[in-house]
Amino acid sequence: MSLKNTLIYIGKNVKPYWPTVAVASAELIFRPTFTLMDKKSPSETKKYTALREGITELIAAPTYLALPVLAAKASDLLKIKDAKAAKMAKHNLQTVGTWTAALVVIPGLCSAMVKPFMDKIYNKKDKNEPAKLDITSKTEIEAPKPQISNTGSTVYPQTISLSAFQNRGMKVGG
Amino acid sequence: MIQNIISNPTFYNATQGTVAQMTIKTGLNSVARPGFILLDKNIDPHTKKFSASKEFLYQGLSLLMYLGIIIPIFKHGAYALAKNKLFKNEAVFKAFPNPDEFKKFLKLGSEQEKLTKLSEISKATGDTFNRTNISEESEHLANGVIESSSLIGTILGLAVVAPLTATKAIHPILKAVGLVKDEPKQETKA
């Protein structure tokens, strides 16, 4: 198919829902990618936001396609005899379908599906995560406090006697 | 009655084309999305105000950028390229010097109106334009150039350029209207 024929095809068959489906599909790739590329946000926040954006666009792209297509089917049911009027009815219903998707259906589906889905993934992840050895946080071991004796001198209590490390006469090899 | 409402020609003409569709859709988003945020009862008032303002600004700036920069470059650029290089022998590009003139012609309701317009252009330019050299196929070609370039511009503008640039402009604006406050710097004692 030559460039000219492709352009003629697009010019003849362009549908009102093409740009919204195209933008939602592109956002499905680019929005999570840009979020993951952000160097200022913490890694876990980036992953969470990117996943959330990905799911939102995954809902939006097929909805932007399905609603106008269904609306066009509804225009067929009206059985408009005049071909020009039928073409305009189809276009107008497809446009209304796109707007309904943008204004009501997608926000509604997202609020019903995205949060529960994210909660499910993150709760599951928390349960499955093995216990990690904490090597970064500070250890809080109390140092022995010095005591003042009756004579006024400072005494440092010895919890482990030095004699514990002395040679008690055990010999290795004989 | 219902058929007359659904097949309304004014609505049909107003919503024709990629640019019109995306302009209306982004305009609706700029009202609907902040509206949904403000209606949410699970968010505290300050966060609601901040998120709704951020969303409104993002949609508004995207729309301005889309209409002001992206579409003029892509739509007019591609039409000029088709007119001067790719299809310079096509009469349709000679008759209509820019995409807006062509779209006005395309929206004319009847064949008679189109013929009248073509004879007007012929008189004005001295060339001959009629339905032989500007056929329905020529109309589809010119429309295809406009719609495909607008579609590419729309994808690049709203899915790539706007998220990268509009978000950078939002923070200073929100700060200027007092919705974002600078976090106090922590002083470290030597």
Image (cartoon, rainbow, N blue to C red):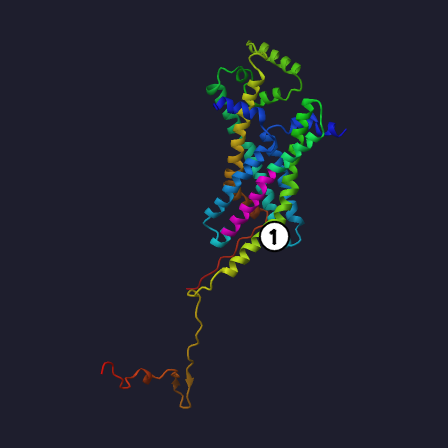
Name the residue at 45% across, 49% down: A39
Residue A51 highlighted magenta (yes or no): yes
Give the image location of residue A68, x and y in percent. Answer: 63, 35
Q: Within the image, what quadrant is residue B125 found in?
A: top right
Indicate the quadrant containing the C terminus of chain B: top left, top right, bottom left or bottom right: bottom left
Residue B50 highlighted magenta (yes or no): no
**Compared to A168, does A58 lie above or below?**
above
Q: Is residue B69 visible?
A: no
Chain assignment, label 1: B
Residue under pointer 1: B47
Give the image location of residue A124, x and y in percent. Answer: 53, 58
| Nearer the observer, A83 or B108 | A83
Give the secondary structure at mark 1.
Answer: helix
The residue type indicated by label 1 comes to: Thr
Name the residue at 53% across, 53% down: B182
- The magenta stretch spans which residues? A47-64
Give the image location of residue B83, x and y in percent. Answer: 50, 19
Name the residue at 61% across, 21% down: B106
Give the image location of residue A112, x and y in percent. Answer: 63, 49
